[in-house]
Image (cartoon, rainbow, N blue to C red):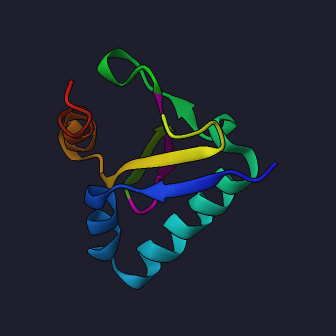
Amino acid sequence: MKYIPKFTEFSKSDYDRLDGNQKKQVLKSLVKLEEIGMNAGQPLRGKLWDCRKLKHKKLGLRVVFRQSALGIEIIEIVIIGKREDDEVHETAVERLGR
């Protein structure tokens, strides 16, 4: 089964701001999401309990995603950004209205 990663308006903007190398690494994450869906990455806790993250340690980037309400095969990309002081997780909570 193939999964379909979908950007939100905000996460598309996050992606567009990345440099070439960062985009290349994020695209690798999206390929992983297409192949294994919600089995990819690590689960998050607290207000992001229904989300998971893929980490790019060398770049300091996190891709936070969740299963979309639109369908079981659709993976919604919530945010792409640096972890700095947990900012990426706090912004994800805001974007999800929690």
Q: Position of residue 33 (x, y in %)?
A: 64, 51
- Whether residue 67 appears in magenta in the rendering, the answer is no
Residue at point 35%, 55% (across, down): 8
Farthest residue in the top direction? 46
Farthest residue in the bottom direction? 20
Q: Nearer the viewer, residue 65 or 9?
A: 9
Residue at point 33%, 65% (across, down): 12
- Res 85 quadrant in image: top left
Q: Main secondary structure of the magenta part?
A: strand
Farthest residue in the front direction? 70
Residue at point 31%, 75% (across, down): 16
Vertical side of 53 occupied by 19: above or below: below
Vertical side of 60 occupied by 76: above or below: above
Q: Position of residue 31 (x, y in %)?
A: 66, 62
Farthest residue in the right direction? 1
Residue at point 51%, 40% (across, down): 70
Q: Is residue 24 left or right of residue 12?
A: right
- Res 73 quadrant in image: top right
Q: Quadrant of the C terminus?
A: top left
Q: Nearer the viewer, residue 4 or 27?
A: 4
Q: Nearer the viewer, residue 18 or 98?
A: 98
> What is the total number of numbered labels drawn onto the structure image?
0
Q: Position of residue 4 (x, y in %)?
A: 62, 55
Q: Position of residue 78 (x, y in %)?
A: 36, 46
Magenta span covers which residues? 51-59
Vertical side of 5 occupied by 47: above or below: above
